[in-house]
C-alpha cells in the first residue's frame, strides 16, 4: 500500500555540482574576455621649431657636507644654499630640472635640508639621483 503522508524531498546535490562547474568555467573564461572600445585618434603633426629643453641644475653633496653647484663649493648651510639657488633663478628657470646627487653616507636630514632649500627657491622639477 502507498503511504501518502510522506513528502518527497528535493535532492539539491546535483544542482550544486552543476552550479560549481558553471562557476569554474566562468572564472576561467572571464580573464580571456577583453573589452575594447574602438576609437579613431587624430593624426598629430610634428612641431617644426622645437624649443630647447631647459638647462639642468645639478647639486652635489659629499659625505663631508660640502655642496657643489657649478664651479662653487661651500659647506652645507640651508640659508646659504637657499640664497645661492635664488641667485641661480636668473640662469635656471624654475621649471628646469634640478638633480640632487647626495653621498649615501650623508644623513637623511641633510638631504631633506637640501630639498627644502630647493623648494624655497621655487624650483618645481626636482629629482634625486641614484646609482
Image (cartoon, rainbow, N blue to C red):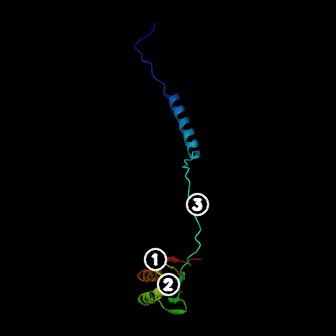
Task: Give the quarter of the image for residue 103.
Answer: bottom right
Q: Residues within 10 Å of mark 2 (few under 14, many from 20)?
A: some
Q: Is residue 117 visible?
A: yes
> Which of disc 3 and disc 2 is earlier in sequence?
3
Callout 1: SS: loop
Label 1 neighbour load within 10 Å: few <14, some 14-19, many 20+: some
Q: Residue, x 58% and y 42% (percent of image)?
A: 29
For label 2, the residue is 92
Q: Is residue 64 visible?
A: no
What is the distance, in whole Å, between disc 3 and disc 1 at their CAs? Answer: 32 Å
- Mark 1 or mark 3, which is nearer the start of the sequence? 3
Q: Position of residue 70 (x, y in %)?
A: 54, 89
Tag on residue 88? none
Q: Position of residue 39 (x, y in %)?
A: 55, 52
Q: Are marks 3 and 1 in contact (CB under 8 Å)?
A: no
Crowdedness near tag 3: few (<14), some (14–19) or many (≥20) residues, C-alpha within 10 Å: few
Depth check, front residue: 43 or 14:
43
The residue labelled by disc 3 is: 43
The residue tagged 1 is 124
Check the image and report above or below for 50 versus 2.
Answer: below
Q: Earlier in the sequence, mark 1 or mark 2?
A: 2
Say which of 89 and 38 sits in front. 38
Residue mark closest to the camera, 3 vs 1: 3
In the image, which is nearer the foreground, mark 2 or mark 3?
A: 3
Q: CA distance from mark 1 to mark 2?
A: 12 Å
- Identified at 45% across, 19% down, the residue is 8
The Cα–Cα distance between marks 2 and 3, rounded to whole angstroms, is: 35 Å
Amino acid at each position: 500500500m502507498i503511504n501518502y503522508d510522506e513528502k518527497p524531498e528535493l535532492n539539491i546535490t546535483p544542482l550544486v555540482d552543476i552550479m560549481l562547474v558553471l562557476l569554474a568555467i566562468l572564472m576561467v573564461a572571464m580573464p580571456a574576455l577583453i573589452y575594447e572600445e574602438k576609437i579613431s585618434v587624430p593624426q598629430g603633426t610634428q612641431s617644426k621649431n622645437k624649443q630647447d629643453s631647459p638647462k639642468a641644475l645639478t647639486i652635489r653633496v659629499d659625505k663631508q657636507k660640502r655642496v657643489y653647484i657649478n664651479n662653487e663649493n661651500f659647506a652645507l648651510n640651508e640659508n646659504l644654499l637657499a640664497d645661492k639657488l635664488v641667485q641661480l633663478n636668473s640662469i635656471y628657470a624654475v621649471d628646469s630640472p634640478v638633480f640632487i646627487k647626495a653621498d649615501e653616507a650623508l644623513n637623511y636630514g641633510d638631504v631633506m635640508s637640501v630639498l627644502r632649500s630647493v623648494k624655497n627657491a621655487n624650483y618645481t622639477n626636482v629629482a634625486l639621483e641614484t646609482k
